[in-house]
Image (cartoon, rainbow, N blue to C red):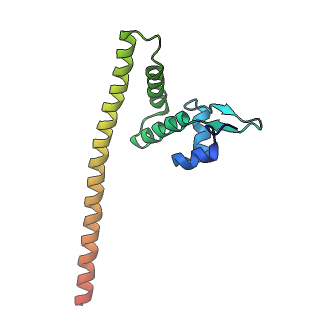
Amino acid sequence: MSSEHMQIGEVATRTGLSLRTIRHYEETGLVLPSARSQGGFRLYTESDVARLMLIRRMKPLGFALDEMRDLLDASDRLDAGAGLDAGEREALLARVREYEQAASRKIGELRVQLARAEEFAATLRERCERAGAEATRS
């Protein structure tokens, strides 16, 4: 086995994803092992790890598998670069920009949700403190 290849367990450790999740992403075609060992074990490269990290970062923002697939396709085609004319390159860049804008919007929405959750926790904390203070006065 080449030192540039990693088995799925090492990839899981490095990405923080479970083996089951990595296999699911393989089944859905989001990431495919770069090779297989003679024993049939999945083998991954740094590029595969980077791809899984991109997927992992999209997931909490609520991107669907089809959106992940679309962004990965656009990124792959941009990275390959060869044979793209200026119009194709610009169309791919526009797709990536749309995802960046969507991610920024989703992050803003999450910040609002987090602020509301923090306000809620603070309200409960104050209620508990008031109740505790009243109990000690009684």
Numbered marks: total: 0
Residue displayed at 28% across by 59% down? 118
Between 121 and 100, the residue placed more toward the observer is: 100
Locate residue 71, reporting x and y percent. Answer: 44, 27
**Side of 67 where 28 appears, left or right:** right
Residue sitting at x 58%, y 35%? 45
Residue 90 is situated, as x and y percent measured from the top left of the image, at: 34, 15
Front position in the image: 1 or 98? 1
* In this rendering, position of residue 61 left or right of residue 108: right
Q: Residue furthest bottom?
A: 138
**Residue 63, x across and y down, in percent:** 42, 35
Instruction: Name the foreground residue: 2 vs 72.
Output: 2
- Quarter containing the N terminus: top right
Depth check, front residue: 56 or 42: 42
Q: Position of residue 102 (x, y in %)?
A: 33, 33
Relative horizontal placement of residue 48, taking residue 136 as reference (left or right): right
| Quadrant position of residue 86 | top left
Quadrant of the rendering where the C terminus is positioned: bottom left
In this view, 128 is above or below 66 = below
- Seen at 49% across and 37% down, the residue is 50
Q: Residue furthest right?
A: 39
For image coordinates 70% across by 33% down, the residue present is: 36
Q: In the image, is residue 135 above or below residue 20?
A: below
